[in-house]
Amino acid sequence: MDKLVRPSQSESDAGRLRILVVEDHQNSAEVISLYLSMNGHVVRVACSAEKGYELACQSEFDLIISDVGLPDASGIELIRRIRRTRSTPAIAISGFRNDESVNTTAAGFEAHFVKPVDFEALCAEIARIVGRHRAR
């Protein structure tokens, strides 16, 4: 695992981020959740698009990180569905290096990471996206 990245002073001032991780692969979900938690964030995990949608509707999140390939629907479909009622920023993750990132951006994701995720880059992107979203 990459080194622990501490939240910046501005992130600390704003408090912990509430992050929803939607990932059906248990090991990936655990690693992402652990890493984000170690960086001071509060993380909820859903293992399907339907559970992710339920959690997104029941609670307020500062960010959603979703796998694109989920067993019951794609992460793209999930974010499109969430976008009907919420503007929570989102990051896509997938195991593919193709034009999928274009599709995820069109669906409403602000960024796309390919597995294995570079956690240092992910933390930097989280800070950028959430900071931009809060500035609105």
Image (spheres, rainbow, N blue to C red):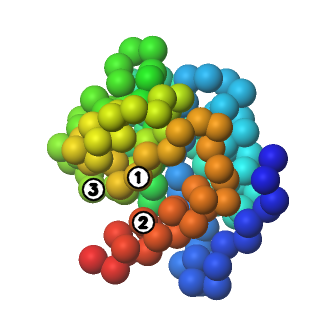
Dot 1 alpha-carbon crowd within 10 angstroms: few under 14, some 14 to 19, many 20 or more? some
Q: How many marks?
A: 3
Counting residues from the N terminus, which is met first, the one under dot 1 or under dot 2? 1
Question: Closer to the camera: disc 1 or disc 3?
Answer: 1
Q: Are marks 2 and 3 in contact (CB under 8 Å)?
A: no
Of residues 90 and 19, the one nearer the viewer is: 90
On the rendered structure, is 47 left or right of 83? Answer: right
Q: Which residue is mark 3?
A: 87
Q: Are marks 1 and 2 in contact (CB under 8 Å)?
A: yes
Counting residues from the N terminus, which is met first, the one under dot 2 or under dot 3? 3
Question: Closer to the camera: disc 1 or disc 2?
Answer: 1
Q: Are marks 1 and 3 in contact (CB under 8 Å)?
A: no
Which residue is rendered at x = 71% and y = 62% of the image? 39
Counting residues from the N terminus, which is met first, the one under dot 1 or under dot 3? 3
Dot 3 alpha-carbon crowd within 10 angstroms: few under 14, some 14 to 19, many 20 or more? few
On the rendered structure, is 89 left or right of 47? Answer: left
Q: CA distance from mark 1 to mark 3?
A: 15 Å
Q: Which residue is mark 2?
A: 129
Q: Secondary structure at mark 2?
A: helix
Disc 3 residue type? Answer: Ser
Residue 15 picture quarter: bottom right
Q: Disc number at residue 111? A: 1
Which residue is rendered at x = 35% and y = 24% of the image? 74
